[in-house]
Amino acid sequence: MQTLLPEGWAPPIGYSNGIKVPAGDTIFVAGQVGWNAAQIFESVDLVPQFEQALKNVLTIVAQGGGEPHHICRMTAYCCDKPQYLAVRKQLGGVWRELMGTHFPAMSMIFVSDLLDHPGKIELEATAIIPVG
């Protein structure tokens, strides 16, 4: 997997502009919210929901034989921009705990609501397990 940073561009913080991956097994992860395996939200707060949603993504990737560093794209949908900005450092701590310093190509999209109430954030991802 190769991180793509065009010459002369400032490095992004907390994500990659692009990732190049040799052919391999591709895992598409549907949007995961912050509920547990029984589909129960254990918290209404953003940070614990983000942690659970990311764990859910990683569990699905692992089920397909992948590891966190195989995730090459992730999109986050969040319902509360002010709250997201207020807890951004805490979210970064959760990220480092679960993903280390691996930063896939990512987008953050703020939405008015999610299907699963009281969801605050939803993560979808693509992982590619390189050949060999």
Image (tube, rainbow, N blue to C red):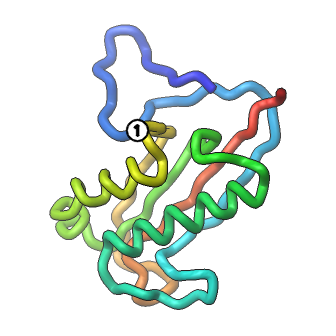
- Could you tell me the amino acid type at mark 1? Tyr
Relative to residue 131, is residue 107 depicted above or below? below
Using the image as rendered, state which of residue 19 and residue 64 is in the foreground.
Answer: 64
Q: How far from the left and from the top, in percent, is residue 74?
A: 52, 50
Q: Quadrant of residue 57?
A: bottom right
Q: Residue at x 39, y 9 (%)?
A: 7
Residue 126 is left or right of residue 46, and the answer is right
Residue 57 is left or right of residue 91, and the answer is right
Q: How far from the left and from the top, in percent, is residue 95?
A: 40, 52
In the picture, the quarter occupied by the C terminus is top right
Using the image as rendered, state which of residue 60 and residue 11 is in the foreground.
Answer: 60
Badge 1 element: loop
Relative to residue 119, is residue 71 depicted above or below? above
Q: How far from the left and from the top, in percent, is residue 38?
A: 62, 89
Q: Residue at x 81, y 42 (%)?
A: 25
Using the image as rendered, state which of residue 103 and residue 121 is in the foreground.
Answer: 103
Q: How far from the left and from the top, in percent, is residue 3?
A: 52, 24
Q: Quadrant of residue 43?
A: bottom left
Q: How many marks?
A: 1
Which residue is at the far top? 7
Q: For mark 1, what is the residue?
A: 15
Using the image as rendered, state which of residue 88 and residue 77 is in the foreground.
Answer: 88
In the picture, the quarter occupied by the N terminus is top right
Judge the density around disc 1: few (<14), some (14-19), many (≥20) Cα neighbours within 10 Å.
some
